[in-house]
Image (tube, rainbow, N blue to C red):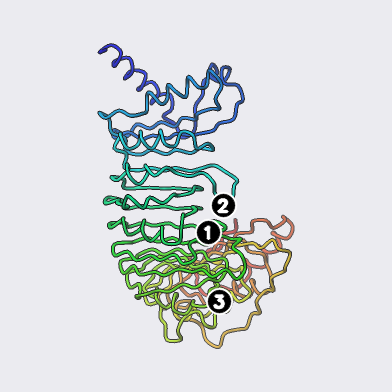
Amino acid sequence: MRMQRAAMILVHRMLWERFNVEDTVVSAYYKRCWGDYGFVATVAISLEDGAKARIRLLQATTFQRRIHAFCRQVFAPSRGSCCRSFAFHTRDSKDIQVWIRAAEKRSVRELSIVIDTLESPPVVELPRSLYRSCRMLVTLKLCNAVLVDDAAYPFSFPSLKKLSLESIKYPNDVFLDKLLSGCPVLEDLVVRQCPGDNVPIVRVRMLHLKSLALGTAEDRAEGDPHGFVIDAPSLECLDIDDYDSGSCVIVNKLSKIWKARLHTGGPHNEKLVGSITSAKRLCLCLPNPKNVYPVSTVFHRLVDLEICTCQTEWLNLLMRVLSDSPKLQSLTLRKGHRYDDGVDVPGPCWNEPSSVPECVSTTLKTFEWRIYEGTEEEKEVVAFILRNGSCLENVTINLDGICLEKGVEMIKALSFLPRRSPTCRITFD
C-alpha cells in the first residue's frame, strides 16, 4: 500500500512537470496513440505550492477511456490534498458532476466551469451539488450553462468574493436575486446575459461590492423590457454594455467610483452618468450627448477619458465632457464598435468651439486616436487639440487598416499641423 501510494505521488509529480505550461503539451508518442481525435474537455489545476497543470481529455475510445480514468484517479477525490484553483472547460456534460465532487473534496477555492457550445441559449445543466458542495469557494466562474433551482437548499457562499455568470440560463426571474443574497462578502460581480434570458431586470443590491460588470444579449427581442437596478454604495469599478437601450436605475450615488465604462443607449443616461462624477477613468459610448448628464455636472477627479467614435454624436459628447473635466490629463478616441447591418452611420459635423476647454490648454498631456480614418472632421479635431494643447507631450495616431499610399498622405498632413506645445511629439503606428 505504501509503495502504491509512493508510485501515485511520483506519477502525480510527473504530470505536473509534463503539463506545467500554458497550453497542452503532448509527446510524439501520445500523439501517435491519440491521433487527431477532437478534444472534449480541458482541465486546469493549480496546487497550493504554485504547481500548475493543464490537461485535455479526449473522446472516448478504449485507450482514451483509460487515460480519462487515470486522470480522474490522479486528480480526483483525495481528502488529504488541497487545490487552489480548478478550471473545467468542456463540450460534454457527462463528467461535470465528477469534477465538482473532486473540487469539493480538494477544498478548491477558485472554480471555473465553461461549456464550449454553439447552442444559444445554453442547454447543458449544472448539477445542484454545485450549490451544496462548494461552499468555501472564493472565486466562481460559470459560462454557457443552465442553472437549476434547489428550493430545498438555501444558497450559501460565505467566502465568495468573485462571481462571473456569462451566458447563463436561470430557472426563473428570482433565482439570481436568491443567488446573490447568499454571497454576503461578494466584491466582484460579472453578469452577461444570454439570448432569451428570463431575468428582465437584474437587481444588484450588495453592500461590499467593489467591481460590477453588466451586459445584455446583443440579439434580444425588440421591445423586450429589460434593465438594471444598482444599489452598491461601495462600488469602485462599473462596466455596462446595453445594446438595446434598457433602463438603468442607480439607487444611491456611486461616490466611490474611480473607473467606469458605459456603452448604453438607454433613456436614463442622465442619472447613470450623473452618479459617477467621482470617476478618475471614464470610457463612454453614448448616442445622445444632450441629456447624457445634468448641466451642472463636473468631473472633478477625471484624469483619463476615452470616447467611442462609433456614434453619430460622438463629437458633441467629446466637447461637452472636455468642458466639464478641468483636470483631464489623457484623452483617447477610438471606434470601439463596428456595425454590420449595412447602414452607414453619418459622421459628425465639426464646429469650432467658442472657447477652449480648460483641460486642453492647461492639463492635457497625452492624446491618442485609435483607428484614425482621416475624415475632414477627424483632422479638425486633431488640429484643434494640437494648436491649443500647451501641455501636450505625446500624441499617437493609429492608422490601422489604412492603405500605404493614403497613410503616407495622412502622416504628411498631420505632421505639419501647428503645435502649441514645444515638447509635443507625434507618433504614428
* Quadrant assignment, res 358: bottom left
Q: In this view, does 372 lie above or below 320?
A: above
Q: Residues within 10 Å of mark 2 (few under 14, many from 20)?
A: some
Q: Nearer the viewer, mark 3 or mark 1?
A: 1
Q: Nearer the viewer, mark 3 or mark 2?
A: 2
Q: Is mark 1 on a helix, strand or loop?
A: loop
Q: Distance between the residues labelled 3 and 2?
A: 52 Å
| Residue in the picture at 32% in, 14% down | 7
| Residue in the picture at 72% in, 56% down | 403
Q: Is residue 194 above or below residue 251?
A: above
Q: Residue 387 carries which label?
A: 3
| Residue in the picture at 42% in, 78% down | 274
Residues at circles 2 and 1 in contact by the CB criterion of under 8 Å: yes
* Residue on which disc 2 sits: 121
Q: Distance between the residues labelled 2 and 1?
A: 8 Å
| Residue in the picture at 72% in, 55% down | 404
Q: Is mark 3 on a helix, strand or loop?
A: helix
Specify whether 142 is left or right of 220.
left
Q: In this view, does 337 lie above or below 312?
A: above
Q: Residue 305 carries which label?
A: none
| Rendering coords of residue 198 (x, y %) | 51, 60
Looking at the rendered image, the quarter that the C terminus falls into is bottom right
Q: Residues within 10 Å of mark 1 (few under 14, many from 20)?
A: some
